[in-house]
Amino acid sequence: MGLPGTGQSGADPARQIAMAIASEGTSEPNVDPVIRMEYESLLRVAELQVAACTGLSVARKGTLSVRPVTRTVWASTSVDAYRPYLSKMTQLPTDLTSDLGPDPTLEIDGERFDPDDPRTQQTLGWLSGLMAAMAPMVAGMTTGTMVGRLALRSLGTYDLPIPRPTSGPDADTLLVVAPNVEAFSTDWSLPADDLRLWVCLHETAHHAVLGVPHVRDAIGDLLARHAGAFRNDPSELGDRLGLDLGLNLDPAAVLDPTTGPELLARLQDALDPEAVLGAVRSPEQEALLPRLEALVAVVIGVVDHVMDAVGAGLIASYGQVTEAVRRRRVTTSDADRFVERILGLNLTQEQVDRGTAFVAGVLERAGDDGLALLWQEGQNLPTPSEIDAPGLWLARLELPPDA
C-alpha cells in the first residue's frame, strides 16, 4: 500500500523513505493553482531569454514546462533521477575477504580475526550472505534518505548540476519546490516574484546547458563512475553491523508514525558523511575528480554568466537575490553536502570562482563565439588545466583571440 494521496506503490522503499523525510511527518497542502499559473508565465520569459543568450535549444524534445510541487512530490520524482548514481555507492561486497589486502586481518568491535581461521571463515561467510540479502534494502534506504534530505532545501530540479533523464513525458518539465522558494523568500526578505523569476531563469539555463548531449553524457558518465568507485572496507562494515545498522530498520517500521521518527534519526546518524566516505574513498575516485570538477566548473560558470547577462535587466532586485542564493549555495552544511561528495561534486566558493574566471577569460579573449565552442563537440570541453588557463583552451581549438 502506498502513501496516501501519492499514487505511489509501497514496493519502492527508496521512494517511500524519501517522501517520509521530505514531508517531515506532516501532510503538505497542494500548491495554489494561482502560483502554478504565475510560474508558467515566468517560464516563458526565462525560456526566450536563455535561448537568445546561449543560442541553445532550451527544450530537448517538445515544449518546456514548469511544475511547482511540494517537497514530497519533488522527492518522489527525484528518486528515479538520483537512484542510478546513489545505488552504486551502496553495492555491498559479497566476499568480505576479497579486499583485506596482503596482510589480511579483520577487526570488528575492537576484536581482531584471522581470515584463515575456520571460525572466522564461517563468520565471514555468514556476513557475506547477510550483505547480499541486505544490499537492496541498504541501497533503497540510502537513496531515499539522501533524496529526502535534498527535498527539504532544494529550490528546483537543478540545485545540483546533475543531468536528469532525457526520455519520458517529463523530460522537459522543470520542477520548482514552491514551499522552499517561498520560505527562502521570507527568510532572506526577498521579493517573492523576483525570486520566482530568478529560479525559472536558473532552472532553464541548467536545462539548456545540461541538455547538450556531449555535456550531459560526459558529466553523467563521470558522476556514475565516481559513485561506483567506492571501495567498501570490510572492517568498517563489520563495525557498522555491530552498531546494528540496518538489521532492525525495516522500511515499514520507518514509515510507521510510532517508530518512524526515531528510526529515521538513527539512519541519518548512521549515514554520517565522514564515517562512510572515509571508509570507502578510492584511488580511482581521486583520479576522476579533476576532470569532473573541471566540467562542473564550466557548467556553473556558464549558468552564472547567463543569469548575470539576462537577469539584471529583468529582475529589479537581481543583485540581492543572486547574492542570497549564491551564499546559500556555498554555505551548505556538511550533512547536506553528503550527496555532493558521493557524486564527486565540489560546490565550494573556490569551485564557483574557478568557473567564473574561465568563462570571463574566454569572453575577454574570444567573445560569445569562443564560449559557443563548448557546445560543438565533446573534444572541445576543457581539460582541468585549461579551466585555469582559458587562453590555452582557445589555442588548442585554434580560435585566435580578438585583436
Image (cartoon, rainbow, N blue to C red):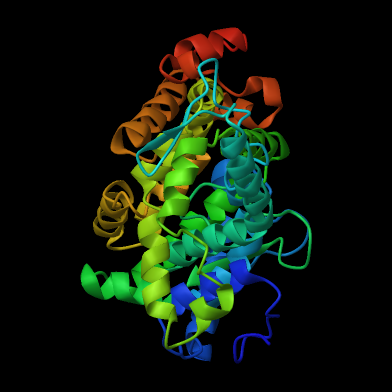
In the rendered image, the residue lying farthest to the front is 118
Q: Percent position (x, y) of residue 24?
A: 40, 79
Q: Is residue 303 positioned above or below 190 on the image? A: above
Q: Percent position (x, y) of residue 59?
A: 69, 56
Image mark count: 0
Q: Residue at x 45, y 73 (%)?
A: 21
Q: Percent position (x, y) of residue 382?
A: 55, 21
1 sits left or right of 311 in the view: right
Q: Is residue 55 visible?
A: no
**174 or 15, which is in the foreground?**
15
Q: Residue at x 30, y 52 (%)?
A: 332
Q: Percent position (x, y) of residue 155?
A: 43, 65
**13 or 325, which is in the foreground?**
13
Q: Is residue 290 positioned above or below 344 on the image? A: above
**400 or 290, which is in the foreground?**
290
Q: Is residue 134 visible?
A: yes
**238 or 292, which is in the foreground?**
238
Q: Residue at x 59, y 63 (%)?
A: 78
Question: The N terminus lies in which quarter of the figure?
Answer: bottom right
298 sits left or right of 15 in the view: left
> Looking at the rendering, which quadrant does residue 227 occupy?
top right
Q: Residue at x 33, y 38 (%)?
A: 348
> Looking at the rendering, which quadrant does residue 23 occupy?
bottom left
